[in-house]
Amino acid sequence: MTPGEVQALLTRQAQQLDDLEHTVADLRATGNPPPGPAEGQAVPFLYGSLPEFVEAVVAPLYAKHGTSGGGWCASWWAHEEARVRLGAIWRAWETLRLDPSIGIARWLRDVADPQMDRLRDPDQGPFTACGDRHLLPDPLPLQQPPAESPG
Ligand SMILES: [Zn+2]
């Protein structure tokens, strides 16, 4: 992680801490939680795109140790499986972050860790062929299904 990335992460965390302090101040002042969104109204996502979420949350959290390749690809967005799994991780994070008590613990246990373990699996993960250079795995082989017989 570069000094600039560390600074960006610290800035985001400082903003989240500031938001939490405002929530605590609201709770102390009124005894009630701050008003949430109206029923049926979706809470806006904190991150505006999957790449933004991956850069801010996934990359620092699952930082690699050592310099050997495998387990990750800097061009993750080019891997269909990675886009699907990381998108699922992001959507779950956006929902579970709203539970301040156990949401992130549940996200780690039920979503992020299992999905990241699958993505980073050195034998079966989509990044297996990627090391110093990006290589897409071959898709599953397919045969055309037989034409359906009439009637
Ligand atoms: Zn790759």
Image (cartoon, rainbow, N blue to C red):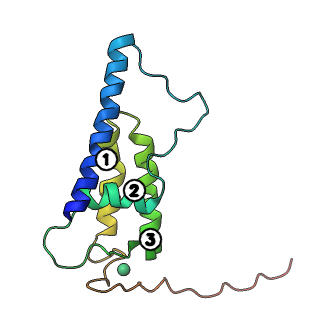
Q: Amino acid at mark 1?
A: Arg
Q: Which of the two labelled residues, at mark 2 and mark 3, occupies the earlier sequence position?
A: 2
**Disc 2, SS:** helix
Instruction: Locate residue 67 relative to residue 86 in the image: left or right.
Output: left
Q: CA distance from mark 2 to mark 3?
A: 17 Å
**Residue 132, x across and y down, in percent:** 26, 85
Percent x, y of residue 77: 43, 72
On the image, numbered disc 1 is attached to which residue? 12
Image mark for residue 53: 2
Classify mark 2: residues with Cα within 10 Å, few (<14), some (14-19) or many (20+): many
Q: Earlier in the sequence, mark 2 or mark 1?
A: 1
Tag 2: amino acid: Phe
Element under disc 1? helix
Taking 122 as reference, is 144 above or below it? Answer: below
Nearest-to-viewer mark from 2 and 3: 2
- Residue at point 47%, 73% (across, down): 80
**Toward the viewer: 145 or 149?**
145
Q: Quadrant of the N terminus?
A: bottom left
Is the residue indicated by label 3 positioned so its CB lies within 8 Å of ligand 1? no
Judged from the image, the quadrant occupied by ligand 1 is: bottom left
Amino acid type at mark 3: Glu
Q: Nearer the viewer, residue 41 or 80?
A: 41
Observer-nearest of 144 and 97: 97
For this orientation, the residue located farthest to the top is 30
* Marker disc for residue 81: 3
